[in-house]
Amino acid sequence: MTWVTWRQYRYQGALAAALLAALAVVLLLTGLHAAWVWHSALAGCAKNGSCASLPGSNLSLSTPLFKTLVVATSAVPLLPGLFWGAPMVASELETGTNQFAWTQSITRRRWLAVRTGWLLLAAAVLAGAVSAIVTWWSGPDNALTADAFQVNRFDVTDIVPVGYAIFAMALGICAGALLRRTLPALAVTLAGFTGLRALTALWLRLHYMTPVTVYYKLTAAAFTPAGSYLGISQGVVGANGQPPVAGPGNYGFNGVPVPAACQQFMGIANANLHAVESCLAAHGYRGYVTYQPASRFWAFQGIETGIFVVLAAALLAVTFWVLKRRDA
Amino acid sequence: MTPVIETSGLTKRYRRVTALSDCTISVPQGRISALVGPNGAGKTTLLRLLAGLAAPTAGRAAVLGSPARQDPAYLAEIGFLAQEIPLYRRRSAQEHIGFGAHLNPRWDGESVRARLGGLKIPLDRPVGALSGGQRAQVALALTLAKRPRLLLLDEPLAALDPLARRNFLAAMAEAAAGGDLTIVLSSHLLADIERVCDHLILLAASRVQLCGDTETLLAQHRVLTGPRKDTTAIARTHAIVREDTTARQTALLVRLNGPVIDPAWAVEEANLEEIVLGYMSQDDPVYGTGPGAARLSAVGGER
């Protein structure tokens, strides 16, 4: 069965390997360039001791084109599931070739297990390889901009792409087995994968662990968490935990509504910001930042990978059940 | 000796439709059995149940004594060729031989090469590029390479031209010549069937109407023709399968239960086509094996 699987997928496998190689060459060249720029800048700042100000500076490591390309690799985990997973069972059912395959001396269970196993492995290897290159490519950029935990960086580096790829493959195979048609299975895989990815990246991920909230005095400098943290919210709250309510004049500064008690400091022409801040602080208001610390990066990678792998396992269980129970 | 196919009460219902109802048949070893019946009679369903591709709603089916199921040992005994002749269209016959070699315990790839070589069918071309007749030959050769003891063929002749049909049937008959292989062949082509088959299963309205060796069936049935007259006397002894009455005369297909005594009737042997058509065109098909057989003998018994 392994041999049969190999024969049926070798051209597609070769195509995937070629595309992977092309992407690797592009990222290798631009990544080497970025690393060279970064290390030159480090060497330069070491001479005059200005390296502390290097992060956040406008050092240009790459062009927007290649940055977009790296963000676009977030589609890579979907592709094997879409183009190999969805047709795996569906195209056999569509053309009736399952009647050839399933009347050889082999159970459907074994047919499904071997194919699914190899395709899952291929998807994981492909996504893992792309992720490894992207992770390496992103090293200097992460050091410069500290955005390893941000959407579009977290999602294309380290282990989560492998989890996504396994999920997409399981979703494609399951949708194909249930719908028995390739095109609808493709559509469901695309929609399901995109939907779940958006849901986790934009909402669920913020809540994997109870976030940390740090309060700071408004009269002091605003608090910035260390390293590549994942920001959730920030602003000003009163002693009651509520944000200030704007007074009659509807004034605000830095986006914070100024309550009635402090409006006297809001001269229309030139407000004394320091006086407003002091007034807010005196009335019990303070600044806060709610975030997931950079130290939780690997925990979050693990949790998110786990979620997608567990969902994949559930989808595959459904697939095995459907293929065993339903008539061919 | 155990029959190669034995089913009892085999029933398959899809959501609302009953595709096969209470099917009880038995096919001895070495027979080439014709599975006939109108469209939608349940022929494909019966074959798919025997091939383990579908599971019965009720009843049981057994091949060589073991129940039909998804099991390597069971599947190894059966060769199934579906109606649409499903092969991987972009793969060559050679590649299919490779697939079979890896998926079957006893596989005779050499026989496929020899058979297709003899028919001058290219092994290295994608099967989608072959003609319908060639594709059917490839599929048959692959099915036989499994060395099955039961070959199930679902209307393999439907898409073939007369020459390809003859070649296909010749290949099939040659494979069965040893006497070990049992074949069930569903088809609408009664003339072809009459030439090669020695056993008949007739399904109509999802029920078995007839099941038996063609010799026995031919011996059991007669065509009676005579002046237009009351048939109750005949019906008292024999079972009237079909009655055709014109202004002048009456023609009956009857299942005999002893000799026809009334000299008013001219008695002729029925051919297989007449018998099959007779049962297929019944308004209320109640004759045959299974529960129908019980009613038939009841009819015959009222003497």
Image: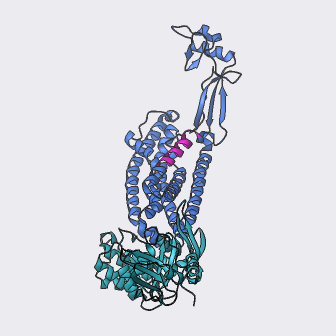
Chain colours: A blue, B cyan
Which is nearer the eye, A280 or A196?
A196
Residue B77: x and y, percent? 51, 82
Regarding residue B65, the answer to whether it shows in the image is: yes
In the image shown, does A282 or B113 lie closer to the viewer?
B113
Please give the range of residues in magenta.
A190-203
Residue A310 location, quadrant? bottom right
Q: Quadrant of the C terminus of chain B?
A: bottom right
Note whether A284 is above or below B122 in the view shown.
above
Q: Residue at x 58, y 76 (%)?
A: B291
Vertically, is A77 above or below B211? above
Residue A60 sits in quarter: top left
Q: Quadrant of the N terminus of chain B?
A: bottom right
> How many numbered callouts?
0
- Image point 51% across, 46% down: which residue? A155
Relative to A283, is A298 above or below?
Answer: below
Whole-percent x and y of residue A202?
A: 54, 39
Residue A39: x, y in percent? Answer: 45, 43
Whether residue B115 appears in magenta in the rendering, the answer is no
Which residue occupies the foreground of this view, B80 or A85?
A: B80
Query: In the displayed image of the protein, which residue is found farthest to the right?
Result: A240
Q: For this rendering, which residue is in front, A263 or A188?
A: A188
